[in-house]
Amino acid sequence: MKKQTVILAMALCMMGATAAMAQRNNGQQGGRPDNSQRIEQMVKALALDDAKAKEFRAVMESMKPAANNGERPSREEMQKKREEVDKKVKAILTEEQYKKYQELNQRPQGRRK
């Protein structure tokens, strides 16, 4: 009887831990927000009005690579695309908003090998 109680308690702990991890990740891989959620976070952080928010969303959505039969774009192509998007974003935002955009858009260094 004691053995069964211990096994039941362990099983409940495992189920609780699994549920907590699934809830923390919110269905996302690695717990990161998807692209549209990230764009919305940036719109709120930059305090954009409706017109600027619409333009900003359109520009940021254009950053998504086109479906090339499953092939990823080259590093050079992505760099060129980033520069184009950056120019467009700079034209939409004020100087202060652009500085904040750059801060928000910085990637942590050292995560990739």
Image (cartoon, rainbow, N blue to C red):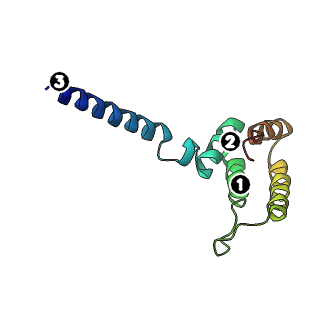
User: Which callout, 1 or 2, points at the residue further toward the start of the chain?
Assistant: 2
Estimate the x, y position of residue 51 in percent, counting from the top left: 69, 50
Toward which corner of the image does residue 74 lie, by quadrant? bottom right
Element under disc 1: helix
Label 1 sits on residue: 60
Toward which corner of the image does residue 38 lie, by quadrant? top right
User: Which callout, 3 or 1, points at the residue further toward the start of the chain?
Assistant: 3
Labelled pair 3, 1 in contact (Cβ < 8 Å): no
Label 3 sits on residue: 2
Label 2 sits on residue: 42
Mark 3: which amino acid? Lys
Q: Residue at x 62, y 51 (%)?
A: 35
Labelled pair 1, 2 in contact (Cβ < 8 Å): yes
Q: Residue at x 68, y 61 (%)?
A: 64
In this view, the residue farthest toward the bottom is: 69
Toward which corner of the image does residue 41 lie, by quadrant? top right
Mark 1: which amino acid? Met
25 vs 86, left or right, is left
Task: Find residue 111 and name its label.
Answer: none
Disc 1 to disc 2, how far (Cα)? 10 Å
8 vs 46, left or right, is left
Estimate the x, y position of residue 40 in percent, counting from the top left: 62, 45
